[in-house]
Amino acid sequence: MDEDDLSSAFEIRARTPYVYLAELSHVIDGDTMLLDIDLGFFTTMRVKVRLSGVDTPPLETTKGKKAKLFVEKELKGASLVVETRKKEKYGRYLAYIYYHPTHKDFENIIRYGKCLNSELLQKGLAEKYVT
């Protein structure tokens, strides 16, 4: 992949103006978590987000517990970029979460990291969900 391909991939994935660096605070279930979002100027905000486009099983089920454990393992110590969408009916922001275990800067997390939403679908831990 050449440099033009990388820049266009970045452009497509980060089209919304609401893209921030974040840290994981707490995983609630496989598709809902609390994030400490870096708003810049030494300001952070704790926000509850729901992963956009995916639905994990309820936490009371074995598959729901597996999804939560997967998310905790994947995001533990990783650098995050969150791309927020609108709020849904329960007040959570719909989001895409990109992560990487070693890269710390925004562009490299997006470029070389994984998308949690896609990873849950690929691992069979979530189903597609249309809001």
Image (cartoon, rainbow, N blue to C red):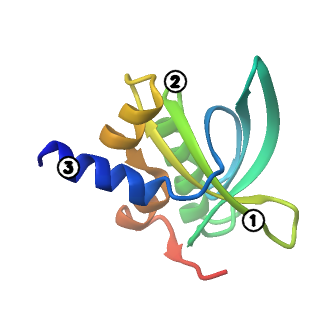
Residue at left offset 64%, top offset 66%: 61
Q: Secondary structure at mark 2?
A: loop
Would residue 15 appear left or right of 100 to someone viewing this image? right
Q: Characterize the local packing of mark 1: few (<14), some (14-19) or many (20 or more) Cα atoms within 10 angstroms.
A: few
Q: Which tag, 2 or 3, sits closer to the chain's start?
A: 3
Q: Characterize the local packing of mark 3: few (<14), some (14-19) or many (20 or more) Cα atoms within 10 angstroms.
A: few
Q: Quadrant of the C terminus?
A: bottom right
- Label 1 – label 3 distance at C-alpha: 30 Å
Q: Characterize the local packing of mark 2: few (<14), some (14-19) or many (20 or more) Cα atoms within 10 angstroms.
A: some
- For the residue marked with disc 1, what is the amino acid? Lys
Query: In the rendering, which numbered label is found on residue 77?
Result: 2
* Residue 56 point in image, percent of width and height: 59, 67
**Callout 1–callout 3 Cβ contact below 8 Å:** no
Looking at the image, is mark 1 or mark 3 nearer the viewer? 3
- For the residue marked with disc 2, what is the amino acid? Gly
- For the residue marked with disc 3, what is the amino acid? Asp
**Callout 2–callout 3 Cβ contact below 8 Å:** no
